[in-house]
Image (cartoon, rainbow, N blue to C red):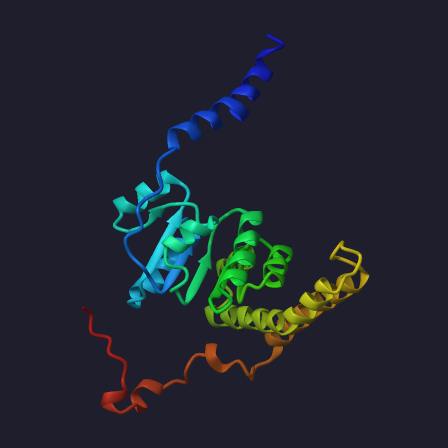
Amino acid sequence: MFLTPGLFILFDKAIIPRYRNKKSKRDQDTIDEKGTVVIAGIGRFGQIINRLLMANDVETVVLDIRSEQIDLMSRVGTKSYFGDASKPDILHTAGIHEASLMVIAIDNRETAAKMVKYAKHAYPNIKVLARAFDRGHGYRLRQLGADYVVSETYHSALEMGAEALRSLNVHPFQVERQKMAYKNIESQQNDVLYHAWADDSSGERVDNNYLKLFIELEALIENALKADLHDKHSKMRGWTPPPKGYAEELQPDEKPNNTKR
């Protein structure tokens, strides 16, 4: 009886993973096409990027190391290849040397960092877009050469915050203006925080100067959001509803086409 909990732990931590690894082993797929963009990872993050590119007639080559994910994508009509994009030979086979862009959308921090470093070293002319897990990981990817880094936690949290406001009956236009105010301040201060992080000689990356700047960023965001609430004539007109009679004043060929298809 006393051994039972330990056996369950052993089963979950050791036996099941080994079984899964054996079950999922298969040879790398033969990559028979080239694309403008090489995408590493076809999870939910990679799927969205791939759909957007394909919708705009951009040819992609998608790689993933999870055989079950490859099979699932095949069932829904998305072509992808089973292969480890962190291996140089597989990247070469995928046509990385002819591609214009590489998207790293995998869910492994260390592997993502190694891939950014390798890609920018071996193919300095290729643009690398990388998925980050948080601010610190994003800074590291940027330091290694990534041309553009997006933190999924940042955007998902911002969207969740916006939905929280909408759920509390805040007007949708006001919600979008608040999102824009947040994004604008974050974007303006991003370089300042990154350089403070990169210049930390202690190796800890989060020294007193960085913390001071981070606190200042939080204050700037708070002030911007509050100012927007009280500013009836905000400069962010992109999310201000059009005036009454707007549609009536348009010429016939300028009016929106609302015909249902």
**Residue in front for this viewpoint, 204 or 85:** 85
- Residue at image coords 60%, 75%: 228
Task: Please give left or right for residue 246 compared with residue 218 in the image.
Answer: left
Q: Quadrant of residue 242?
A: bottom left
Whether residue 162 is visible, yes or no, is no
The image quadrant of residue 244 is bottom left
Residue sitting at 46 percent across and 54 percent down?
105
Q: Is residue 24 visible?
A: yes
The residue closer to the viewer here, 79 or 217, is 79
Q: Looking at the picture, does residue 32 appear above or below residue 27?
A: below
Judge by depth and name the residue closer to the eye, 120 or 134. 120
Position in image of residue 181 (x %, y %): 58, 73
* Quarter of the image with the C terminus in it: bottom left
In the rendered image, residue 38, in percent from the top left (x then y), is placed at 39, 58
Figure quadrant of the N terminus: top right
Residue 222: image location, x then y, percent: 67, 68
Front-most of 104 and 8?
104
User: Residue 104 vs residue 93: left or right?
Assistant: right
User: Who's the residue at 69% across and 65% down the image?
Assistant: 218
* Residue 35 pos. (x, y %): 33, 62
Looking at the image, the residue that sits furthest to the left is 261
Residue furthest top as drawn:
1
Task: Count numbered badges in the picture.
Answer: 0
As drawn, 131 above or below 25: below
